[in-house]
Structure formats: C-alpha cells, structure tokens
Amino acid sequence: WAMPKRQDNQRQSDSPAAVQSVDRALQVLDILAELGNAGVTEIAAELGVHKSTVSRLVAVLEARGFVEQVSERGKYRIGFAITRLAAASGAHLNLVKVSQDICDGLSVDVGETANLAILDENRIVNIVEAIGPAEITLRTWVGQSCPAYATSSGKALLSGLDAAEVRTRLGGGLEAFTDTTVTSLSQLHNELASVRDRGWASVTEELEVGLNAVAAPVRDVHSQVVAALSVSGPTYRLGVDRFEEVAKLTIAAADEISRRLGWISRD
C-alpha cells in the first residue's frame, strides 16, 4: 500500500539503510516541531512509511529523551534532550554575541588578528574573528578546526582539563606539523602547567612556519574554561619578544568576556 510521501529533506531511495534511518528520525523531529504533537499513524502518513517503521524510530528517540509521550493518548512531542542540545548551541551563540566587540578591540590594540575558539574533542574550532589592521591576506580562521596541542588557543583550553582528560582526548602520538611542534605528552603537560600558572599560552611556529600566537582562557560563571581568546600574526611582527606585552592585553580582553558570561575573579 502507498501513502503520500513527505517531500522535505527526502533521501534518495538507494541511500544506505543506516543513513536513511537517521534521516527519517530527524524528519520525525521536524514533524513534531511543526505539529506540536502527533501519533505514530500521523507521522507515518507524513513520512510515507509503515507504522512499524515509525514505531521503531519513536522508540529509539524516546529512549534517548528526544521525544516523549503525551499522557496516554499515544501521541508524542519533542523531549527535553532537544532542550539540552539547544542550550549547548545557545551557549556558543552567546559567546559569539558577547565577544565580537572585544575581539575587535583587541585586534586594533595589538595590530593583529584576534580569534575566539572552543574545544571540540581534541581540536579547536574558531567561532569569532577580528582581522587585524595590518593583515594583508584574505584568509579567515572562522570555522577552521585545528589540533589543540599545536595552537595557543588549544593549549589555553587544554589547561582547563586535568592530565587524565588531556591524555584521553589526545590519545597516542602527537603529529609534528613543523620542527617546533610539541610531540611529547610529558612536554605538553609541562607547558599546560605553565599556562595555568601565568594565565596565558603561546605557540612559536608550531602549527605553521612563520606563524606565532598567544592566547588566554575564557571562563564561565562556574570558573570553567569554555573558550580561548587568541592573537596570531607572522613571526616578523609577533615575535617572542612581544609575547608578554600581547599576553597582558589578551588576558584583560579574555577576562572581560568571562565577566560578561558571569565569571567573578577570585583574585
């Protein structure tokens, strides 16, 4: 028997079964978001599949908290797990909102590009950027994912984790990108200890030859490191001799973002 098929976001019929199941599960969430609540029969009609298929999908989504049953009527609605994911996404959006003007100001003060990054497993992702006035390239770091151990932002973010968590995230060997990349976990742990003591991290041509950077951690209301603010530039402008000067400005800017997130300094 045939039922009208939902046209939005349909996969091709030759998609792998696992991918098709994920796609259908996401469509179930779309339907519930649109309708408010719906029963298995109604969802099946929207998707154009048998009720047994929808029952299996809903059972998995309900077990994970993504949908929940409405009383005893056999209808379902969006569950609290979606709220949790939305809150996590909102936190990142809030970071972008409260930090852009500070990144802009830091970039002007230092004369180099400033970025705000978050930690994603063993890598960092830049979510905010302010191109420095001296920048002569159109390159952007927003959305770029880089290995945490080879970046100043990554070191600032990793400094907020304990040694066991750092080992778990980074795994075994650390790949060398340049001659100065830190490839020893013990050396990295020593550097992270220094970051905690002085309040800032740095890299000297560890990710790319000719590129240096300095970063400071950004903390939330619970004093947890949730992001890192960095300044990066070519070695001929951002030399090691400028690190302390730039670090002081970067720490001040990172602390201002932290205060906007509700952090209160205990100093």
Image (spheres, rainbow, N blue to C red):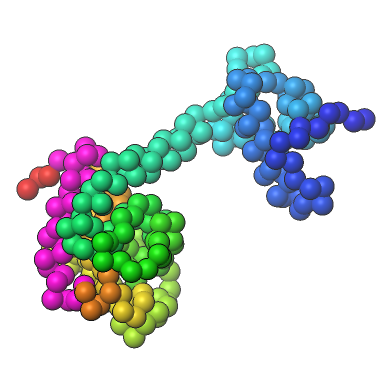
Q: In the rendered picture of this protein, how many numbered marks are placed on residues? A: 0
Q: Where is residue 253? Give x, y as percent.
A: 18, 51
> Relative to 226, does residue 27 appear above or below in the rendering?
above
Residue at the (50%, 34%) spot, across then down: 81
Q: In this rendering, does residue 233 appear at all? A: yes
Q: Is residue 249 left or right of residue 19?
A: left
Q: Where is residue 128? Give x, y as percent.
A: 35, 52
Q: Is residue 11 left or right of residue 237?
A: right
Residue at the (70%, 21%) spot, across then down: 39
Q: Is residue 75 left or right of residue 142?
A: right
Q: Where is residue 30? Give x, y as percent.
A: 63, 31
**Is most of the magenta stretch helix, strand or loop?**
helix
Residue 171 in which image quadrant = bottom left
Residue 45 in which image quadrant = top right
The one of 121 and 249 positioned closer to us in this rendering = 249
Q: Residue furthest right?
A: 1
- Quarter occupied by the N terminus: top right
Task: Reply yes or no: does residue 243 show up in magenta.
Answer: yes
> What stretch of residues is rendered in magenta?
238-264
> Relative to 207, does residue 246 appear above or below in the rendering?
above
Q: Residue furthest bottom?
A: 179
Q: Where is residue 153? Give x, y as percent.
A: 30, 62
The one of 15 and 209 positioned closer to us in this rendering = 209
Task: Reply yes or no: does residue 63 show up in magenta.
Answer: no
Q: In this rendering, does residue 118 appear at all? A: no
Residue at the (51%, 33%) spot, across then down: 82
Residue at the (19%, 76%) spot, across then down: 239
